[in-house]
Amino acid sequence: PTRAGFFLGDGAGVGKGRQLAAVILDSLARGRPRHIWFSSSADLRNDAIRDLTDLGCHCPVHDGCASLDRATKGLGASKESQAGVLFSTYATLVSATSGQKARGSSRLSQLVAWCGG
């Protein structure tokens, strides 16, 4: 099955976070447990949490790199980190740890695997 995605590129102060939080809340209600929220800055993670909480969406918001690295290092992902919102930056898509470079893996591969693909 295919999954929907979208890009929202409005200007500052338009309410992009609230719009994305509403889409995630709707998707959770439809039984889709995993979501990825990309942003330009890691500092906006707290804003994402605020937007989700303000809409009544109390799902966990994971730091993308930390959660992905934990699972990759063989520590295993906690049960809580297997669902919710994985918050990441655009720069994360092209980044890789030194161990990943040696294996030819990428952050994108980790994200796809986390989503179940």
Image: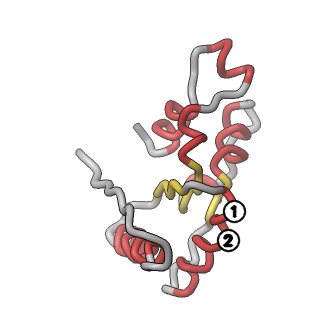
Label pair 2/1, CB-CB below 8 angstroms: yes
For the residue labelled by badge 2, is the local secondary structure a helix, a strand or a loop? helix
Q: Foreground mark, 2 or 1? A: 1
Residue ID at (38%, 62%): 9
Image position of 33 with respect to 29: above or below: above
Residue ID at (35%, 74%): 26
Instruction: Single out the residue that lies furthest toward the front.
Output: 11
| Nearer-the-camera pick, 82 or 67 | 67
Type of amino acid at the residue the image marks with label 1:
Asp
Image position of 30 with respect to 77: above or below: below
Image position of 66 with respect to 24: above or below: above
Question: Separation of disc 2 and disc 1 at Cα?
Answer: 7 Å
Instruction: Single out the residue that lies furthest toward the top.
Output: 102
| Nearer-the-camera pick, 69 or 20 | 20
Which residue is the site of mark 2? 46
Image position of 45 with respect to 5: above or below: below
Type of amino acid at the residue the image marks with label 2:
Asn
Figure label count: 2
Is residue 18 left or right of 29 when viewed as pictured?
A: right
For the residue labelled by badge 1, is the local secondary structure a helix, a strand or a loop? helix
Q: What colour scheme does the image use?
A: secondary structure
Q: Position of residue 43 (x, y in %)?
A: 69, 62
Which residue is the site of mark 1? 43
- Number of other residues with Cα within 10 Å of mark 1, as a class: few under 14, some 14 to 19, many 20 or more: few
* The C terminus sits in image quarter: top left
Residue ID at (32%, 57%): 6
Q: Position of residue 22 (x, y in %)?
A: 40, 77
Is residue 21 left or right of 58 when viewed as pictured?
A: left
Residue ID at (49%, 54%): 36
Q: Position of residue 32 (x, y in %)?
A: 38, 61
Disc number for residue 62: none
* The N terminus sits in image quarter: top left
